[in-house]
Image (cartoon, helix red, strand yellow):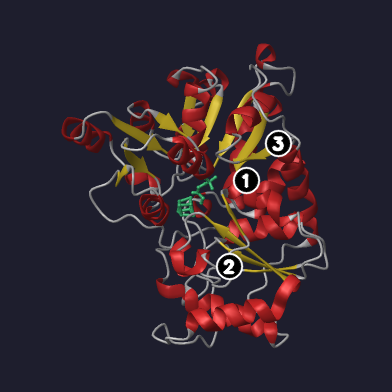
Amino acid sequence: MTTVDLPLLPLGRGTDPLSERGVECPGDLPAASDPDLVARARAAKEALGDKVFVLGHHYQRDEVIQFADVTGDSFKLARDAAARPDAEYIVFCGVHFMAESADILTSPHQQVILPDLAAGCSMADMARIAQVEKAWEALAQAGVQDQVVPVTYMNSTAAIKAFCGRNGGVVCTSSNAEVALDWAFAQKGGVEAGTKVLFLPDQHLGRNTAVLKLGLGLDDCVVWNPHKPNGGLTAEELRDAKMILWKGHCSVHGRFSADVIDDLRAKVPDLNVLVHPECQHEVVLKSDFVGSTEYIIKTIEAAPAGSSWAIGTELNLVQRLAKAHPDKNIMFLDRNVCYCSTMNRIDLPHFVWAMESLVEGVVVNRIEVDPQTEQEALVALQRMLELPGKSHRD
Ligand code: 13P
Ligand code: SF4
């Protein structure tokens, strides 16, 4: 199967069924200028009562997050999705791979709804299942496949999670990447036996965790480029590597740069730099604190009044933190605006449309993973949910 790399399709028009993005969203949406949208969303939520459970990722717009029953990072939302088996509808205010995971983790009678089907993830799109299967085959040709444990970041399609499930691997999030890698390196006889990890699709989370948490060297890591024959690597490089990092990245976190940290430190005394592990390695190295969105929120909550923070994560969250903590000096770690364009696709008109449709008994934009993929992906997700809370080395 050939895969074509398409640019982001504007506003969800057009289709690309192989990817997270650009699937058509044919809704008859209310106008964004309708002054009654907030009241309409509130009324729809009230009318649905316990039948609906609304999940909101921290990167969602304020206009949407106000209606979430729970907010969280990818890990917390995956757990929370399964925590309300009585809710008939799970409305997921986040992106496509999160809604897929919610569908996998909830009961068959529960229906998961993504208010805008165009809310994909450009990072998840960087690893297509056909490319990953091809890489797996190349690892067999190089004589190393038996030693490799695949680990996929939550930010991947259900098909990639299923690949990990059927090949002895696991899912991780930015909250538990360290324990997931600990677990993976203990499989297949452990590091002494030459166990390696194929880390998908975010090279930065993989590298940052392997080097800064597990103590591997940068030269233990190689990057698999799916657009080059054999990933651009020789059999010898693959044999020598401990971490095979997929060449994927987050288009939002990949923008933060180390020179902005230097500039800000020169201007702001006692500045604390707090970033997400999807940032580039040089950025994380220059930061003081690194962690998932949930960790970022907790760190700011615990910070003393008057302290200064430059935060490297999505702008909706940074703005919300600045508003919630006026006693702290909170700034954004980029010179330019840096929203996640696909997270931002879930806006009030889409939310109102999805909720009012449910009130009328019409389920729109249901996310449904096919049974075979679901079964295999569940194996990898359950392995993640069963990981210990702390690293094995603590
Ligand atoms: P977390 O929710 O795991 O912090 O990940 C951030 C992200 O980029 C989600 O798309
Ligand atoms: Fe994907 Fe990055 Fe947006 Fe998260 S912030 S949904 S990883 S593009």
* Label 2: element kind: loop
Q: Closer to the observer: label 3 or label 1? A: 1
Q: Quadrant of the C terminus?
A: top right
Residue topped by disc 2: 17
Q: Amino acid at mark 2?
A: Pro
Tell me: residue 363, above or below residue 20: below
Residue under the image location 59 percent in, 64 percent down: 68
Mark 3 nearby-residue class (10 Å; few <14, some 14–19, many ≥20): many
Which circle's residue, 3 or 2, is located before the other in the chain? Answer: 2
Q: How far from the left and from the top, in percent, is residue 341?
A: 40, 62
Q: Which mark is residue 169?
A: 3
Q: Amino acid at mark 1?
A: Phe
* Label 1: element kind: helix
* Alpha carbons under labels 3 and 1: distance apart: 17 Å
Q: How far from the left and from the top, in percent, is residue 309?
A: 33, 38
* Alpha carbons under labels 1 and 2: distance apart: 26 Å
Residue under the image location 59 percent in, 33 percent down: 177
Q: Closer to the observer: label 1 or label 2? A: 1
Residue topped by disc 1: 75
* Label 3: element kind: loop
Viewer-side residue, 195 vs 170:
170
Q: Quadrant of the N terminus?
A: bottom right
Q: How far from the left and from the top, in percent, is residue 20?
A: 55, 61
Q: Closer to the observer: label 3 or label 2? A: 3
Residue under the image location 73 percent in, 42 percent down: 380
Mark 1 nearby-residue class (10 Å; few <14, some 14–19, many ≥20): many
Tally of numbered discs: 3
Q: How far from the left and from the top, in percent, is residue 77?
A: 64, 52
